Image (spheres, rainbow, N blue to C red):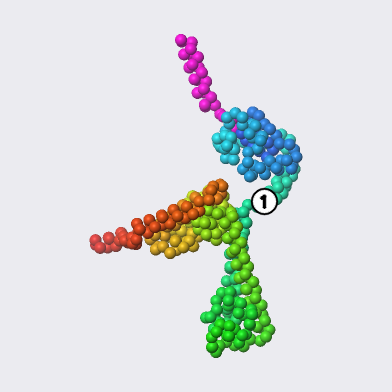
Amino acid sequence: MRRRSREFSDRQRSLTLKEFLPAMILVTKWFGVFLCKADRVVRKTLFPKDPMEMAQRLAAIQRGEVLPEERAMAQEKVDVAEPRLSPIGKPVVFDSSFIRPENLGYDQTLMHQVMMELGKIRTREPVRQDRIVIQAIRALDSVIEIINLMSERLHEWYGLHFPELADYARDERYSILIAEHGAREGIIPEIGVKLESVGAELTPADMEAVRALAASLVDLHQQRTDLENYVRERASECAPNLSCLISEMLAARLISLAGGLDRLAKLPSSTVQLLGAEKAMFRHLKGHKDPPKHGIIYQYPDVHRSPYWQRGKVSRALAAKISIAARLDQFGGEFMGEELKTDLERKLTDIRQRYPNPPKKRASKSRGKSRRR
């Protein structure tokens, strides 16, 4: 009995010691996979000295994949040196600077060739749909900005000849009338009014220049319409839940501000709520101004139509649903856009019923002290 108890205590002591011993750490470098213990390499698998093959492995690593060499090395229970390898081990902080490529026959020339091949592989990869949406919505914003500038210039220029036209035609129709008819004598019958203009006469050369500017503006308006339709189509394909919840255009702007659908899905809802209000947030942090309650989601109808005392709560509820929709779209969840929209409407109705009146303003401390005096 004493021998058995002594053997059991020895076995328990050995198990306890193993818990305190440093675990095996799996480390991946650009030239191989290493299994380390403390500051020494226990086992290693070096990549072949072919720039193309090494670049393909590095491209897989950058995409977040686990290499076959890493899975083969992690047959036993090991820790890993990067979060990418969390499926095969526990990520820990580990200093692997003692593993040097020159000690294993890998020089800087080979590294340069590998990096060149890696750049070619990554640039040839298919572009994700959210990246297309980001470029499209930014192009649309640029076109809108150009339209606003050119429209202002056209109004000032043509206003010298027919200033009254701005009261009867706006936006695209304004530029279409000028491009098609030019002089005010041809435009007045089109707008169906009888008036005597106070504008000056323009020479034929000046009128042709104005009409050319108006024609360019008409083309820009058409390009804007085409881009808006394209963004709606791409956004509904890339993020169907998000597009159903808040509309395709607002979904595209949120994806652009976040830097991609993957990053939007990983952001907390409190950050999503303030996307687009970074300047106001910095003013709050620097100058002790009131913190912003919403960012680009202010464009959502239920946010900007709500009374000021409800906007913060409405924005918070909307941001929470946006986070759920973005995660469903990013990680391949089922379509729940209509359900999310119904839940949001129920939540907004509850907010309006619970907070129908503005809060009472509290008297400041300075006023209270002055009254006491």
Residue closer to the observer: 258 or 46: 258
Residue at the image position 74 percent from the left and 43 percent from the top = 52
Which residue range is magenta in the image? 1-25
Residue closer to the observer: 270 or 41: 270
Task: Decide whether the magenta segment is chiefly helix, strand or loop.
Answer: helix
Residue closer to the observer: 74 or 129: 129
Instruction: Write down the quadrant of residue 366 in the picture.
Output: bottom left
Q: Is residue 82 visible?
A: no
Residue at the image position 56 percent from the left and 49 percent from the top = 330
Residue closer to the observer: 336 or 122: 336
Q: How many marks?
A: 1
**Which residue bears the numbered disc 1?**
126
- Is 13 on the left or on the right of 118, as rendered? left
Residue 116 at what x, y percent from top left? 72, 47
Residue at the image position 51 percent from the left and 22 percent from the top = 15
> Magenta stretch: residue 135 in it?
no
Residue 44 at what x, y percent from top left? 67, 31
Instruction: Write down the quadrant of residue 369 in the picture.
Output: bottom left
Q: Quadrant of the C terminus?
A: bottom left
Look at the picture and state if 222 lies above or below 134.
below
Residue 45 at what x, y percent from top left? 68, 32
Circle 1: element type:
loop
Instruction: Write down the quadrant of residue 135 in the picture.
Output: bottom right
Look at the picture and state if 262 lies above or below 44.
below
Q: Is residue 238 visible?
A: yes
> Magenta stretch: residue 24 in it?
yes
Alpha-carbon neighbours of circle 1 within 10 Å: few (<14), some, or many (≥20)? few
Residue type, mark 1 in image = Pro
Look at the picture and state if 299 lies above or below 44.
below
Residue 370 at what x, y percent from top left? 27, 63
